[in-house]
Amino acid sequence: MSRSAPGWLADFQARFSSMLRTPLDRASGTLTAATAEYDPQLCSEALDGPLSGAAERLAVYNRQYWFRLFSVLHAGFPLTARLMGYWDFNAVAANYLLAHPPGGWDIEQIADGFRPFFEDALDESAPDWRLALIESVRIDAAYREVFRAERSPPFRPLASDATELLTGHLVPLPALRIVEEHRALVVLRTALVANPSSATVELPPLLVRPQTWAIVRREAGTASIPIEAREAELLTLLGRHSVGDALGCLESACPAEERAELPDHVRAWLARSIELGFWCSLRRDG
Amino acid sequence: MAFSPEQAESLGRARGLAPEALGLGLRVPHYDYVLEHAPQVDYFEVISENFFGAAPTPRARLERVRARYPVVLHGVGLNLLGHAPLDSRYLDALSRLADAVDAPFVSDHLCWTGAHGVSHHDLLPTPYVPELVELAAERAHDVQRRLGRPFAIENLSSYVEFRASTLSEWEFYTAVVRESGCWSLLDINNVYVSSQNHGFDADDYLATIDFSRVLQVHLAGHTREPNGTLVDTHDHPVAKPVWELYARAWRMGGPFPTLIEWDARIPPLLEVLVELEKAREARR
């Protein structure tokens, strides 16, 4: 393969990289390049131009670096960014990007670790707001993961699978996530994606009771399917246990007044989950 | 410009497109329209890295577009001028994608995009020195050989110059293309943006271009910052002075395939198609 680069190039690119990642200053109320923070050696290596001085010319790249990465996070977490407002969202995003600078050639990968970082960074002094943002970032992350998941054909059981169903493990489709909300966030997210803007949106009121959704990618696109809370519990248990054990766990957790109807519900939920393509295979242990 | 029969034959074979072909950079908001209405576009160009990942939806859409149109690949992450060696996993992914869409040619930029393990996702300049001509030319030559298909190098738009440079931007660019044995992707907007930001004559730049090596020309819009700096934002229609420069380039070295890029604040496809009509006009 090709020759090695000259040693000075690595040093030059280290200085330039450091300039690119210099955080933008928020003190003025707009994001501005903090040119005073740039490496003096890099500034002396750059030439003044006909339109601006050396540091201001470098600042074009500094601003582009941040705004490009912010825009990827805005696109990946549209609900969270619009609920929080871009100004506050960008503050968390900047801290995240400083801690986790982009490493791969796929720019979308920069968002891979954002959800846990965001949850840890939230202020605990406003618990309702914090809970809403945690739900929103989990919903955004679910859509993102579903979009990026590998293709896998859905499991369509044969008659011969029936005898092994109880002892087998239903393997969830990689492009399936279950999310819960206490406010109508999934519907809000759908509306925001259909009408992109940078405007902050109001937090929807609390629902009478929490709503659970299955987010699943199909040939025609990503679908959001409302499901019952107990149905979601079953799907989660099926993802962790054999079918027989999952049913046992569900029954144990079920209040006495629901138990009589549980077998009928379980049959219907299982049939629906297979019809909707929530599983990719039946794994037989041993 | 009159090329020798050998040059013309070599150029035609490398392009794999009609010499007057007009193409568009294909972006997500336009996929549905393209697949439903099959607009009159001679070819599409896609950003290579957007199709390297496991996500099946982008790849499935690309396959449907490819079934109807030629598709060329344009990269933004090769890191030709990075201090580290080229990433062989990246080249493998690029090679697989090029084979999958049977791309007539592949292109990327004369720049660096990351260093010391960090990818900056930007097209960054270096000092323009002979030492880096040799480095970039040898790497580009290896890329072309590894891909087994023509590889075109795009000139950069730049916002800063360095004291250490001993070559002009165009001397550096043309030397790398010539010494690599690769091809040129000439971005006319980038020539104009750099000329305004650094105070040189864009026609001096064009005069050095060997049009017998130009596989494709790019056109895009730019933004003027308050201090007058032009930034290659791809979020506007092509500016009037760029159309004028394009017309002069056409007279100097045309015909050549021409492609419109629009990457931010993307309007409906019909509005982008208007830019192709303007390109036809500019050629007259």
Image (cartoon, helix red, strand yellow):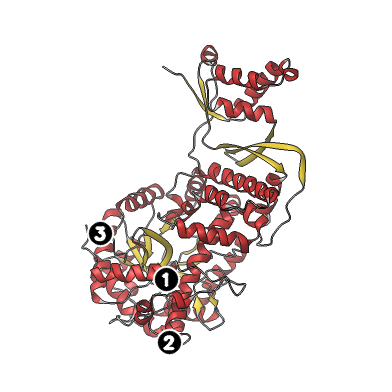
Do pointers 2 and 3 mark residues of a single chain? yes
Disc 1 crowd, CA 10 A, few/some/many (<14, 14-19, 20+)? many
In what quadrant of the picture does the N terminus of chain A appear?
bottom left
Q: Position of residue A232 (x, y in %)?
A: 64, 30
Give, as a three-letter code, the residue at label 3: Asp
The label nearer to you, 1 versus 2, is 1
User: What residue do we see at 38% from left, 71% from top?
Assistant: A16
First of labels 2, 3 by sequence position? 3
Dot 2 falls on a residue whose secondary structure is loop
Q: Give me the C-alpha separation between circle 3 and circle 1.
A: 31 Å
Residue at the spot of label 1? A19
Residue B39 shows in this picture? no
| Camera-side mark, 2 or 3 | 2
| Residue A279 to residue B277: above or below | above
Mark 2 lies on residue = B199
Above or below residue A163? Residue B71 is: below
Which residue is nearer to you in this view: A142 or A245?
A245
Q: Secondary structure at mark 3?
A: helix
Answer left or right for B154 relative to A179: left
Question: How many numbered marks have been drawn onto this rendered protein structure?
Answer: 3
Taking the image as shown, residue B185 lies to the left or right of residue B57, namely left
Q: Is residue A58 above or below residue A141?
A: below
Residue at the spot 38% in from the left edge and 59% down from the top edge: B118
Q: What residue type is disc 2 on? A: Gly
Q: Which mark is residue B108?
A: none
Local SS, label 1 = helix
Q: CB atoms at circles 3 and 1 under 8 Å apart? A: no
